[in-house]
Image (cartoon, rainbow, N blue to C red):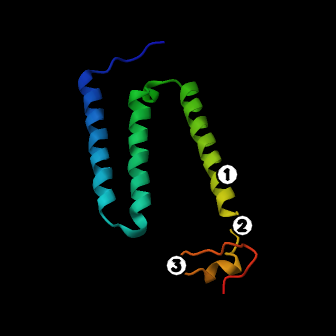
């Protein structure tokens, strides 16, 4: 297996790009973008993950088998996220019991069988 040797300057430039993206992440977190906060943060995070995977993990210069294994891992992770989000979205959230809305000042009855009127 032969690998190309990259210069230190190349890796430092990728590292600096990661630092700039990290600074961008923290600065975007301070700005109110409304509904775009999460998508922008996820886009920056995906860009950083792609830089790490492509250059520091050498996927850019790897063979097709290693790339296939990395893509299969990402697909498996997305499948797990989809199952978890599907489970959370379909859970039944019970309504608040009728007697709880009558609590005043955080005082609860010492006898749970007695109504709080």
In the picture, the disc for residue 92 is 2
Give the structural element (helix, strand or loop) at label 2.
loop
Determine whether the residue tagged by mark 1 lies in a helix, strand or loop: helix
Mark with earlier residue (3, 1): 1
Q: Going by the picture, which residue comes out furthest to the top?
A: 1
Q: Residue at x 71, y 67 (%)?
A: 92
In depth, the one of 48 and 114 nearer the eye is 114
Q: Quadrant of the C terminus?
A: bottom right
Residue under the image location 43 percent in, 68 percent down: 35
Residue at mark 3 to residue at mark 2: CA–CA distance = 29 Å
**Which corner quadrant of the image does residue 18 belong to?**
top left
Other residues around mark 2 within 10 Å, as few (<14) / some (14–19) / many (≥20): few
- Distance in Å between CA atoms under marks 3 and 1: 41 Å
Left or right relative to 44: residue 100: right
Q: Position of residue 87 (x, y in %)?
A: 69, 57
Instruction: Please say if 39 is above or below 79.
Output: below
* 55 w.r.t. 49: above or below: above
- Residue at 41% of width from left, 16% of height from top? 3
Numbered disc 3: secondary structure: loop
Comparing 99 with 76, the one in front is 99
**Mark 3 or 1, closer to the camera:** 3
Q: Mark 1 points at which residue?
A: 83
- Which numbered disc flags the more N-terminal residue, 1 or 2? 1
- Judging depth in this view, the residue of 104 and 77 nearest the camera is 104
């Amino acid at each position: 297996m032969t690998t190309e040797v990259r210069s230190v300057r190349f890796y430092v430039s990728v590292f600096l790009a990661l630092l700039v993206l990290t600074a961008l992440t923290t600065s975007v977190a301070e700005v109110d973008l409304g509904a775009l906060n999460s998508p922008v943060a996820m886009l920056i995070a995906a860009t950083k993950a792609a830089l790490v995977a492509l250059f520091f993990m050498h996927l850019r210069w790897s063979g097709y088998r290693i790339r296939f294994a990395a893509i299969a891992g990402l697909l498996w992770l997305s499948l797990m996220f989809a199952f978890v989000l599907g489970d959370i979205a379909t859970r039944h959230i019970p309504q608040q019991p009728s007697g709880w809305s009558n609590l005043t000042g955080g005082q609860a009855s010492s006898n749970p069988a007695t109504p709080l009127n």
